[in-house]
Image (tube, helix red, strand yellow):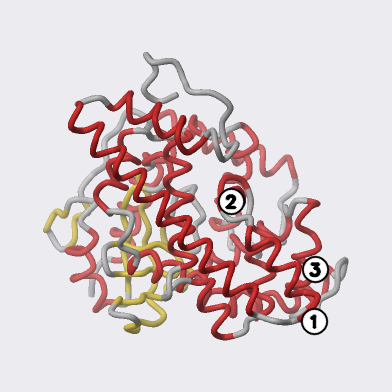
Amino acid sequence: MLDQEAIRAQVVRNCTVSDARYAGFYSVCGLALRLRDLYKWENGLEPWQEEDPPVMLDWIGHKEEEWETLMEEEFLPITIEGVAYDPFDAGAINVVLEPQGLIYGAGYLHSLKPSFLLGRLDEKRKEDGASIYFLGKELARDLLVVPALSQEEDVFIRKEAARLFLWNQIFFIRKSARQALAFALGNYGVKEGEYEKLKERFHRIAAEETEIYLHHELGEIQETVFDRQVWRDLIATYPHTPVELFARAVKDLLADTHTHGNLSFIAREKRRASLGFHVAFLDGVRKELFPEIIAAFNAFTESGDWRPIEEAIEAGCERGREIARKMVSLYREGKERSDTVWVNREIWRQLLIPLGIVKEVPPAQSQNG
């Protein structure tokens, strides 16, 4: 048997190094919310359980002290039975860990923050050519709470993180999205303001909605219009900028509306609650990119007819493909020019400004806007 505690400690250490390095990328409010979630995970709390402020503040103080000691440290290899593995080589590590019922994840997420994960494997299955890993209890994780992620042809469904992610989306819903949220919860037999009933039924709701996260990742794997390498290069060249956020939003739209994606799955399976959640949680750039789904949802709630939803999915897919092709073209032209500043400015001028995402082109000397 492997020394699981030793493996867990190594992954936790790399998670903490990543958090220490990237804590400054978040707003004060954003960091506080992520720390709150990390505390809940470390202490085994339910998503709706809140710690007393003095206890929470004391814990945050200790966490910040820990970060200070690790901020300049490098990520260390993951050593298993005397063999040292690159911490980003999840494939090789999982060859050793999967037979022991463990799954390891590593990669770069928003703003190219390195992210690491270790969890117990609850279930594995094949779907649309992808290997799907359902993780139960998570043994190590960092600040980022994402319900699912994909690496090449593998999809990792984080059931613990998915529950917390969904609860936060419900709890922090925008006022303008409350009608769609009420529609979604109503289809699970929960009315607005029925807080105790929501808690009682939340485990079932989260389990049902986990399928939606899965199909988003399947859509992302199957989608080929947005050249994968160009997309990665855009993210790497313009991290933590409007271009990164826009590229991610376009990729999400293409995944959502792909034949194998979550919106197509929702329409095929006639999942009314999931549709309501999708519309309720659509915000920011993603909402600007896909206005058709809002109008279609309003029509659907009146008639129950899925055709407006299906038509909106087709329209969103076509828009996503058009924008993706344009971004790929601009990036390749800029590469020929050896001018990343030109690419940044042209994406702003030709795509971001017309959509109302930004107001003016950044100065020529500023690559990242």
Q: Which residue is mark 2?
A: 39
Q: CA distance from mark 2 to mark 1?
A: 31 Å
Q: Which residue is mark 1?
A: 189
Name the image quarter holding residue 187: bottom right
Question: Residue type at mark 1?
Answer: Gly
Local crowd size for mark 1, using a 10 Å CA cut-off: few (<14), some (14–19), many (≥20): few
- Quarter of the N terminus within the rendering: bottom left
Residue at 72% over, 52% down: 172
Q: Is residue 90 left or right of residue 270?
A: left
Is disc 2 placed on a helix, strand or loop?
Answer: helix
Residue 323 lies, in percent from the top left, at 42, 49
Q: Is residue 51 left or right of residue 159?
A: right
Question: Residue type at mark 3?
Answer: Ala
Q: Is residue 178 left or right of residue 75?
A: right
Residue at 47% over, 63% down: 317
Residue 234 lies, in percent from the top left, at 32, 40
Name the image quarter holding residue 297: bottom right
* Tag in front: 1 or 3: 3
Is disc 3 placed on a helix, strand or loop?
Answer: helix
User: Mark 1 or mark 2, which is nearer the start of the sequence?
Assistant: 2
User: Mark 2 or mark 3, which is nearer the start of the sequence?
Assistant: 2
Name the image quarter holding residue 72: top left
* Tag in front: 2 or 1: 1
Residue at 71% over, 51% down: 51
* Mark identifier at residue 205: none
Which of the pair 97/284 is nearer the observer?
Answer: 284
Is disc 1 placed on a helix, strand or loop?
Answer: loop
Q: Which residue is mark 3?
A: 182
Residue 208 lies, in percent from the top left, at 59, 80
User: Mark 3 or mark 1, which is nearer the start of the sequence?
Assistant: 3
* Tag in front: 3 or 2: 3
